[in-house]
Image: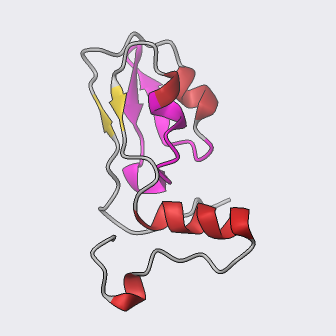
């Protein structure tokens, strides 16, 4: 099944491979399979699959992952789903959120 890409090249996700201990927690908690293990360390497989939920950052015991959760279009999509409204990050209004 193809993964969702929200917007290309806007994701704030960063991974410091030096800090990664290979625990696989990011793989366990990521809902979109953004990470993989290569050479006993996590690596970002496809950054654009990230919806910036923040689960990986919050669960990384080594603080090797950073992501600005709650920003951009992913946040608008989630808030729309939670509020049962149209997903929106106000991109159409000309705001700089995306």
Q: Position of residue 88 (x, y in %)?
A: 53, 77
Q: Quadrant of the N terminus?
A: bottom right
Query: What residue is drawn where x is 53% and y is 19%?
Result: 24
Residue 36 visible (yes or no): no
| Residue 11 left/right relative to 18 | right
| Residue 56 left/right relative to 14 | right
**Residue span colored magenta:** 31-57
**Which residue is outermost to the front?**
83
| Residue 12 left/right relative to 85 | left
Residue 67 sits above or below residue 41 on the image? below
Q: Position of residue 15 (x, y in %)?
A: 31, 31
Q: Position of residue 34 (x, y in %)?
A: 49, 42
Residue 14 sits above or below residue 9 on the image? above
The part of the image, by quadrant, that contains residue 19 is top left
Residue 66 sits above or below residue 48 on the image? above
Q: Could you say which is closer to the camera, residue 38 or residue 4?
A: 4
Q: Position of residue 85 (x, y in %)?
A: 69, 77
Residue 48 in the magenta stretch? The answer is yes
Label total for image: 0
Q: Could you say which is closer to the camera, residue 45 or residue 14?
A: 14
The part of the image, by quadrant, that contains residue 14 is top left
Query: What residue is drawn where x is 40% and y is 69%?
Result: 7
Residue 14 in the magenta stretch? The answer is no
Query: What residue is drawn where x is 36% and y is 29%?
Result: 65
């Amino acid at each position: 099944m193809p993964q969702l890409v929200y917007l290309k090249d806007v994701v704030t996700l960063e991974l410091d491979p030096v800090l990664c201990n290979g625990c696989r927690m990011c793989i366990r908690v990521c809902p979109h399979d953004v990470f993989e293990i290569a050479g006993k360390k996590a690596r970002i497989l496809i950054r654009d699959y990230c919806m910036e939920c923040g689960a990986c950052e919050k669960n990384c015991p080594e603080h090797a992952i950073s992501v600005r959760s709650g920003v951009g279009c992913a946040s608008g999509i989630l808030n729309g789903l939670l509020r049962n409204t149209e997903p929106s990050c106000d991109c159409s209004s000309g705001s700089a959120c995306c």
